[in-house]
Amino acid sequence: MAGGQAPRDVLVAGGGIAGLACALAFRRRGVPVTVLEQAPEIGEVGAGLQVTPNGAAVLRALGLGPALEQAGLRALAVEPFDALSGRRVARFDLTRTGGDYWFLHRAALIGLLHDAARAAGVEIRIGARVEAVRPDGLRLDGATLSADLIVGADGLHSVIRRHLAGGDRPFFTGQVAWRALVDAPQESVARIWMAPGRHVVTYPLRDGRLNLVAVRAESAWTEEGWHHADSPDALRRLFPDAAPELARILARVEEVRRWGLFRHPVPDHWHDNRHVILGDAAHPTLPFLAQGANLALEDAWVLSREAMRGDLDAYQAQRRPRVVRALAAANANARNYHLAGPARRVAHAALGLVGALAPNAFLDRLGWLYGHDVTAVG
């Protein structure tokens, strides 16, 4: 792709949410697309996610609204809790977002994107690991594949990101996270159980299980990725003072994964004339604002639109400031969830006051995020 021309074909490295959404978005615009996925099959295990209105808008524009409603569980509210006393600090009504706020399993979202991409004619190659970026394409298995536009949706350790922006130095945030699925009933709300130096987020999935993510401040970690198995007892020991309801949830954890949280700088350059990145390859997110999948969906739509106009500069110009702002908001949440001492008491009192006197203010301050519909622009 050069000279401001729309791509005649697209090659996508990565068959996760970003890659499949990108492939589907280009295919909806009539462009032949091939997806390369290094895993032996397309899929995801062991995690839930939240699709917020900005992400749901993209899924609906891609024709996946009914599939989202079938796979997801409509969210009613978000409830901050004191993890030690069990007291609900506030409740904020998510139906004010128009009802387009969903909880679903990550595998379900990948499944509906995969099925739609296949049905639209996207070619998906599994077991295809990209080894290197070459001037004439991507090298894998001793061969080179080429296309007018090569998209890096290959995640944290993106080969294409390294080609565009060089190596970066991710730094450990001082926080470690645990993820689990638990058989436990809960109303269709996201609960944030806040404690000094740690917190837990729980929300239900359509299959009746509860998705659980716990985060605690720790001094050291060596490796990214959330595939590291840990002991359920180790997770429970982080919350010896948990309120009875939270303790009961933690008691039901049978399998848990642990990972260190790292921040990556958002690169200044997301593309050249032929290569471009999106999703985690461009801006890995921390789990404090539930925006990883949603920002990837936005990226996919904007990239397909601007690439078809021959303007990758416009793609970067629209996306980079927004994701930088979202990452900053996520970092702020991480601090607020872990307050201790007088600051914690003051913050909880203020949150409760907002919930009682101005409940709309909580969501209004996120209007720039949830209310932004990239499919309605241009």
Image: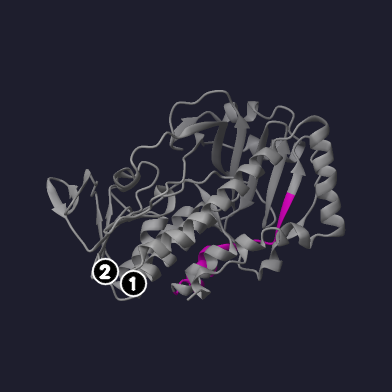
Tell me the residue at 37%/60% (across/down): 20
Q: Is residue 282 left or right of residue 248?
A: left
Query: Do we see residue 105 in this rendering?
Result: no
Q: Are marks 1 and 2 in contact (CB under 8 Å)?
A: yes
- Is 130 left, or right, of 185 in this rendering? left
Q: Residue furthest top?
A: 219
**Residue 78 visible to the viewer:** yes
- Residue denoted by label 2: 7
Query: Disc 1 marks which residue?
Result: 308
Residue in front for this viewpoint, 24 or 347: 347
187 above or below 254?
below
Residue occupying the far left of the picture: 142
Q: Earlier in the sequence, mark 1 or mark 2?
A: 2
Q: Residue at x 29, y 69 (%)?
A: 4
For image coordinates 49% across by 68% down, the residue present is 58
Segment colored magenta: 63-79
Residue nearest the viewer, comparing 375 with 260: 375
Does the magenta run of residues contain 70?
A: yes
- Residue 60 vs 22, above or below: the answer is below
Give the amino acid at mark 2.
Pro
In the rendered structure, find residue 334 and report the number of the disc placed on it: none
Rendered location of residue 14, percent (x, y): 33, 52
Question: Crowding near pointer 1: few (<14 within 10 Å), some, many (20+)?
Answer: some
Q: Amino acid at mark 1?
A: Met
Q: Nearer the viewer, residue 85 or 309?
A: 309
The kind of secondary structure element at disc 1 is helix
